Image (cartoon, helix red, strand yellow):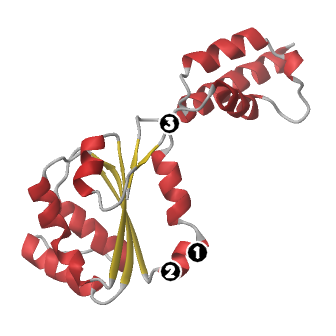
């Protein structure tokens, strides 16, 4: 399954919520999380999956050895993998990368990506597109980052806050980051007066 959306939307956060859920942990015998980014190096990714699955550093360097080890580690088991921030759109790389995973009884893979082409390439089910937050959702998130329980929104310049929320264009990461920065400046200013 692919979670698709622009940077800062919360793809990784959503994948983390799924990956860390108790229900999921009980459904799979093995779990692995690998950050991929732009360098889709099959050897490195396979080694990282083995290390994540076993909790021990994998010392193999050759792809054939790595794939044999991964196949052995997955053999007959129910396995959940998260591949975070995937950019590779080459089918041949995907096929080679996934070859040892056929040894698993069940191998579920969640991929986070900015690319719909990646999602279509690995798709065995419809991908999940994340959308930007609405203004009301953005405003709510920003206020949670800025306002403490003691503060009232009328103590803070609302017009400035609304401009900041609009400029964030519904991206949760930008909203939380700028909200936290805004809050720290307000707090500093209020402690100096």
* Labelled pair 1, 3 in contact (Cβ < 8 Å): no
Measured Cα–Cα span from mark 1 to mark 3: 26 Å
How many residues crowd around disc 3 within 10 Å: few (fewer than 14), some, or many (20 or more)?
few
Q: Given contact means CB atoms under 8 Å apart, are the residues at marks 1 and 2 in contact?
A: yes
Q: For the residue labelled by badge 1, is the local secondary structure a helix, a strand or a loop?
A: helix
Q: CA distance from mark 1 to mark 2?
A: 6 Å
Residue in the foreground of this view, choosing between 145 and 124: 124
* First in residue order: circle 2 vs circle 3: 2
Tell me if residue 155 comes above or below residue 71 in the rendering. Answer: above
**Mark number, residue 27:** 2
Vertical position of residue 86 compared to residue 51: above or below:
above
Q: Do labels 2 and 3 touch, CB within 8 Å?
A: no
Residue at (79, 11) in percent of width and height: 157
Q: Which residue is under mark 3?
A: 131
Q: Nearer the viewer, residue 164 or 116?
A: 116
Element under disc 2: helix
Mark 2 against mark 3, which lies toward the viewer?
3
User: For numbered disc 3, what is the local secondary structure?
Assistant: loop
Q: Quadrant of the C terminus?
A: top right
Q: Read off the residue under disc 1.
A: 23
x and y, in percent, of residue 113 in the image: 34, 46
Q: Residue 4 lies in what quarter of the image?
A: top left
Classify 78 as above or below 111.
below
Q: CA distance from mark 2 to mark 3?
A: 28 Å
First in sequence: mark 1 or mark 3? 1
Rendered image quadrant of residue 53:
bottom left
Q: Is residue 55 visible?
A: no
């Amino acid at each position: 399954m692919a979670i698709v959306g622009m940077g800062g939307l919360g793809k990784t956060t959503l994948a983390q919520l799924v990956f860390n859920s108790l229900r999921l942990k009980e459904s799979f015998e093995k779990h692995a999380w690998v950050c991929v980014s732009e360098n889709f190096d099959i050897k490195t990714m396979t080694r990282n999956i083995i290390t994540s699955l076993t909790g021990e550093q994998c010392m193999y360097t050759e792809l054939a050895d790595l794939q044999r080890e991964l196949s052995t580690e997955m053999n007959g088991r129910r396995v959940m993998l998260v591949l975070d921030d995937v950019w590779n759109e080459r089918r041949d790389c995907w096929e080679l990368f996934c070859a040892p995973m056929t040894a698993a009884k069940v191998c579920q893979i969640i991929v986070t990506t900015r690319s719909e082409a990646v999602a279509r390439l690995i798709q065995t089910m419809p991908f999940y597109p994340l959308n930007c937050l609405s203004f009301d959702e953005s405003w709510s998130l920003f206020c949670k980052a800025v306002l403490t329980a003691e503060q009232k929104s009328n103590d803070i310049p609302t017009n400035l806050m609304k401009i900041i929320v609009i400029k964030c264009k519904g991206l949760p990461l930008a909203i939380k980051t700028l909200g936290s920065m805004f809050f720290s400046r307000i707090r500093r200013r209020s402690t100096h007066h």
